[in-house]
Amino acid sequence: MLGLLAVGSVALDSVKTPFGEVSEVLGGSATYFATAASYFTKVGVVAVVGEDFPREHMAFLKGHPIDLEGLMITKGRTFRWRGEYGYQLNEARTLETQLNVFQQFNPQLPSNYKTAQVVFLANIDPELQLEVLLQTRSPELVALDTMNFWIGGKRAALLKVLGKVHIVIINDGEARQLVQEVNLVKVAREILKFGPKVLIIKRGEYGALLFTREAIFSAPAYPLETVFDPTGAGDSFAGGFMGHLARTKDFSMDNLRQAVILGSVMASYCVEAFSLERFRTLRLDEIMERYRGFKRLTHFDEMPNAV
Amino acid sequence: MLGLLAVGSVALDSVKTPFGEVSEVLGGSATYFATAASYFTKVGVVAVVGEDFPREHMAFLKGHPIDLEGLMITKGRTFRWRGEYGYQLNEARTLETQLNVFQQFNPQLPSNYKTAQVVFLANIDPELQLEVLLQTRSPELVALDTMNFWIGGKRAALLKVLGKVHIVIINDGEARQLVQEVNLVKVAREILKFGPKVLIIKRGEYGALLFTREAIFSAPAYPLETVFDPTGAGDSFAGGFMGHLARTKDFSMDNLRQAVILGSVMASYCVEAFSLERFRTLRLDEIMERYRGFKRLTHFDEMPNAV
């Protein structure tokens, strides 16, 4: 049985950063998510590519514990994205988006995907996210990502799907846009009113915040000297986070905290190289070593006595 | 004997934020620093005010364990600053600076200040910071703050004083400007080459990073619903940080981490009201309670076993 199901994009990215430039490399939200999650559990991908999708990229995905039965190959060209980053590396400037085969994307779940207990709806049209959810059989945990485009343009559908998911994973700009409020504590309270039990706000180089109605958990980003390409960091975060939850089936606050750190670990490795290059060599013991690095980075003692 | 000595400004601030506006309220780097530090140890202030400095503000300072022998009252008007903040509350826009009596400020240490073992040089002309250091008798720990104005305009004097201090406490923009580099890990390595053993980079709502040559510690800012006025947050941070170090006389990495959290606690209380209003009522047990809040905010368990 499939532990984790993800729907999203598989793409060819062309990316320019201050440290170099790559053309038509492997990308896409489902790609980053599934690759990161595959270190923790077997993950099924629902996505679409064109007939031009390079065999080497297919081989890369097959090299990880990723189920590709849900990856449709259809007539036409694969989804393409072109973007660049400035020296601050904090936000991509999109130069071009070619939807291509993604334009007619109509996600169909293979039968053994329908019983997946953990589901991730990457950033796609909220109407498609709803369609995917309708094909599943009451999963225990559903998480969703979205973006400014859908928040502005498909608000009604987005609010509908927000009412059906347990976890929202978005960045700070998107969270603020969603409820038209600057203060993140207030933002979180409002978003949790839409239905989700957990909100994760990704803040790039500043880490991530996890909100429930009762508690907040703050995780830093890992301080790196070599940030080559931030593309996919958010989806790699979600992959590590959801992969851990799907593997452990423990949705307690303590385990959510560990999952946030594992997500942060996967994001930190993702940005060390272009595309998914770092995941070609990344080993489980490196993931555990960086987890311990996060512990050293954030640990401080209780106060032994009153000051 | 004086535990902690601070040199800096005592000012009258006029501040506008999205939540209100105040005129000629108590402000200044030495004021915020000393008030925050006074919860941990007795602190002496070296600064200057004019004859117009309101008696109520003097009474406020005297209401805390602050030694005012070093606070000169001279002919003329007190230093004034006027600024405003936008909705993001992340950076002040300075509308007016009147140096007034601060223009002729020539810090003179009372004799019992000269043996202070812990010294904080708030953000003033690095030449004045040097003059203060020359009057001290080999303090065990000296920390310094500075700003873009001195980094750009008095670089030689600033580098000279950087070679004589143990700790630098600046914000991310200043740190990047100082060594002309974006990546904070590289920034830290370069700044530590100037002499200091410890660099603290303040990042406002994103918390603070502490760097030594061997380790990094990351602390978040406390998520608050009511940020009324960020003025003085950085100096309150420094006050809590240095106050704890002066009280404990323990400069180990473990204690530096605790000091960063106490600094973050003091900054978090500072911004809850205009001016130093929150420090009128703040109690030690509230400081300890928020320290425990930081622990809950950041704690995650070790991995029990390999994933």
Image (tube, coloured by chain):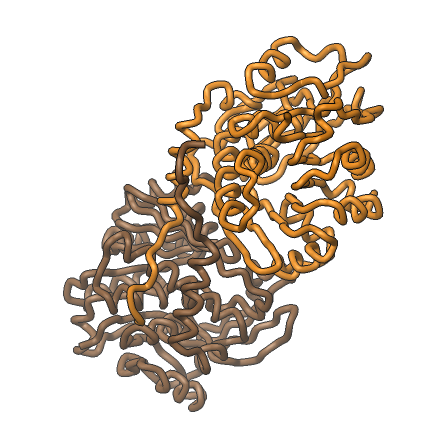
Chain colours: A brown, B orange
- Find residue A47 and report its horizontal and vertical position in percent: 34, 76
Q: Quadrant of the C terminus of chain A?
A: top left
Residue B112 vs residue A46: left or right?
right
- Say if B181 sits above or below A65 in the image: above
- Say if B111 sits above or below B132 in the image: above
In the image, A237 versus B260, the foreground residue is B260
Give me the residue at 78% from left, 44% from top: B161
Give me the residue at 50% from left, 51% from top: B218
In the image, B248 versus A147, the foreground residue is B248
Give me the residue at 68% from left, 25% from top: B82
Residue B43: quarter of image: top right
- Find residue A53 and report its horizontal and vertical position in percent: 43, 86
Residue A280 vs residue B135: left or right?
left
Camera sees residue A179: no
In the image, A281 versus B211, the foreground residue is B211
Give me the residue at 30% from left, 56% from top: A256
Q: Quadrant of the N terminus of chain A?
A: bottom left
Camera sees residue A4: yes
Residue B21 vs residue B182: left or right?
left
- Find residue B5 and report its horizontal and vertical position in percent: 67, 30
Residue A14: quarter of image: bottom right
